[in-house]
Image: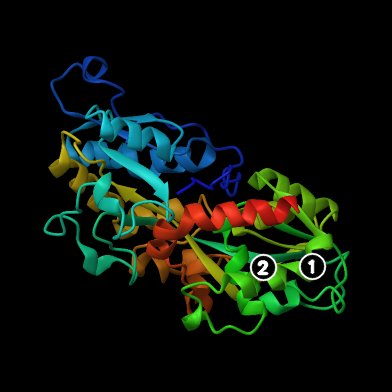
Amino acid sequence: MKNFRGMKHGAIGLAGMLVIATAGCSDQAAGSAATTLTVLDYGGPYQQAHEKEYFAPCAEELGVNIKTDEPTDFSKIRTAVEANNVPWDVVNFTNDFGSDAAGGDYLEPIDYSIVDKSQLVDGYADKYRVGSDIEATVVAYNTDKISGTPHSFADLFDTKTFPGKRTFYRSVSSGVLEAALIADGVAPKDLYPLDLDRAFAKLDTIKKDIIWWETGAASQSMLASGEAAMGLVWVGRAVDAAKTDGAPVKVSYDQWLQIDDYWGIPKGAKNAELSNKLINCMNDKKKQVAWSQLMVYGPVNKEAAKDPTVTSEVNRPTNHLEKQIKVDDDYWAANYAKIAERFNDWIAQ
């Protein structure tokens, strides 16, 4: 499947934060024979938060050195595994990679005798991956352009009650088809397999009003400027539009789609046991609470998700899990290519 991150992570909560170097950039630099673990991550403020609250303290606790590589790209992981030349020990990726149906081709199974799954929010301990954070694809809107309060995907598609342009990510697996079907009356539990004819028919009803975005920064700009009155966007970008840009942008959590990040161990990694220990270390409640102060996303440690300093952020996804609509990653792993072809043809028409 396609890696559809597109600069998902903005600058939430990191104003003025110094870049934190990971503990021990190399064995030579550390002056010891300690094992070096290499983590493939997404870069930017998101990775800086990992470095500060996860990598540095876990390096000390585990007695290892940690260095990073960036950015994550699914094709890089696949190529390295297929060539039996894997330079990373742990990789971070979005939920359109590594599902139970497809993860075994490129990832080692998680060792749950080392990784304590009991501390995780339900649904974030898979065979080949462990959740690193809980994110959200949400309906967001510019209050200068929208009169009233949208509450649902049906409102997102209702340009009569809520006039104005709509913005969607130009990626078939970004949730646009799921949102269209729910807006058309399909119950979330009945989404899969997707009724493609029905989904595209619903999209036809607002096609002339759609502005497509291809990077998270573009979606943020469209909402902040009012070029788009409403859209289906990553929550971090919607919150940045309000907090960083000072725009009148609000988020609705009455219906929202799952989008998450995961840790995994690439197939053929040389330090699997230590990699599992690193993942377990990063799942620690105290570390996840601290990380959550730097990002708007939700922690996967269920006790951290209940911490008052975490729940105080109204737009944190873990405060709204009862409204989360799950995405079937196995379905997308099996069907992405053929649906993407139809999606791209539909846009071009």
- Kindly identify which residue carries mark 2: 200
Q: Position of residue 267 (x, y in %)?
A: 22, 41
Q: Amino acid at mark 2?
A: Phe
Q: Earlier in the sequence, mark 2 or mark 1?
A: 2
Q: In the rendered view, does 109 fall on the left or right side of 99? A: left
At numbered mark 1, what does the secondary structure look like: helix, strand or loop?
loop
Figure quadrant of residue 173 = bottom right
Vertically, is 55 above or below 155? Answer: above
Vertically, is 197 above or below 232? Answer: below
Q: In the rendered view, does 124 fall on the left or right side of 113? A: right
Q: Position of residue 296 (x, y in %)?
A: 55, 57
Figure quadrant of residue 101 = bottom left
Q: Amino acid at mark 1?
A: Ile
Q: Position of residue 136 (x, y in %)?
A: 54, 63
Please tell me how crowded label 1 is: few (under 14), some (14-19), or many (20+) other residues with Cα within 10 Å: some
- Kindly identify which residue carries mark 1: 206
